[in-house]
Image (cartoon, rainbow, N blue to C red):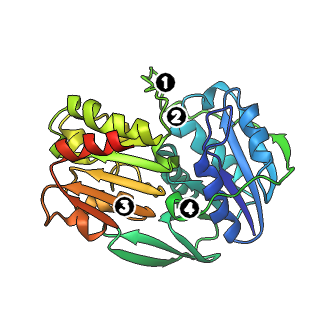
Amino acid sequence: MATLLIAEHDNASIKDATNKALTAAAALGGEVDVLVAGEGAKGAAEAAAKLKGVRKVLLADGAAYAHDLAEPLAALIVSLAGPYDAIVAPATTRYKNTLPRVAALLDVAQISEIIKVVSPDTFERPIYAGNAIQTVKSKDAKKVITVRTSTFGATGDGGSASVDNAAAAADPALSSFVGEEVAKSDRPELTSAKIIVSGGRAMQSRENFTKYIEPLADKLGAGVGASRAAVDAGYAPNDWQVGQTGKVVAPELYIAIGISGAIQHLAGMKDSKVIVAINKDEDAPIFQVADFGLVADLYQAVPELTAAL
């Protein structure tokens, strides 16, 4: 059995989600090749070649793959799919957009956000916002799989795979790149941060995120997250959203401030190793999953915590 892993990267390096998805891909058994598609992505390909257990790296370098457009990337993956029994990618925004197209073009059913490989054709995945675990057995000759990376450990270096050039596929020309606004931050990316400080609707304003949440996060070297309610209210940007419709995270420490603990939010962070909750409502659902809970007014408790650190 051979598996093609689609790498999440920034052209210069491989992202942590790739290392974790590689762990899942290796659990399928057989050889694992890695596809790095981008523009000026040689650095990422060389980094992928050093990952333990990788047989070879396929580098598709071209302008068509520069801006994460799903259609040309899906066409490329399908053109390379022939010798592989499984196509695997981390369940990031990029591949939640791309892999369903790959599955449709291959006429197979996608298996989304797996959390465990039971056997090469059987997988576990969460449903109902993580309240139930579904076991899926696929009869498709080719498996198209996305991996919920928060449940897998990261594969380290130790490999010395070759890097081969992959021929670009014909661009379907169904979409074109118009522009982008890139948010830059010195804080760690949410999906790879070891500590996350998140705020909820109780923060009441964007200014309060700046005044209370961000100083605490900076003291801890943490990423900053938010509940959907806070994002919808305009208190925090979209890329901070943690939850079922945001980012799924599993840091060493998750601090939830003014977050009630709606089921959709819990689905995105309940796998965190240690959960600390600060909320003035002692009946808030967040306390049911918290390892440490503080019933207090956040506007008093958070500055005191920040000062103590």
In the image, what residue occupies the spot 34% across and 52% down? Answer: 255
Are the residues flagged by discs 4 and 2 in contact, CB closer than 8 Å?
A: no
Q: Mark 1 falls on what kind of element?
A: loop
Q: Which residue is mark 1?
A: 177
Q: Mark 4 falls on what kind of element?
A: strand
Q: Position of residue 303 (x, y in %)?
A: 26, 40
Q: Mark 2 falls on what kind of element?
A: loop
Q: Position of residue 170 (x, y in %)?
A: 65, 35
Q: Which residue is mark 4?
A: 145
In the image, what residue occupies the spot 55% across and 72% down? Answer: 116
Question: Is residue 166 at all visible to an observer of this figure?
Answer: no
From this view, report whether residue 259 is shown above or below residue 59. Answer: below
Give the crowd class for mark 3: few <14, some 14-19, many >=20 residues within 10 Å.
many
Q: Which residue is mark 2?
A: 69
Question: Is residue 299 at all visible to an observer of this figure?
Answer: yes
Q: Where, by quadrant of the figure, is residue 14 drawn?
A: top right
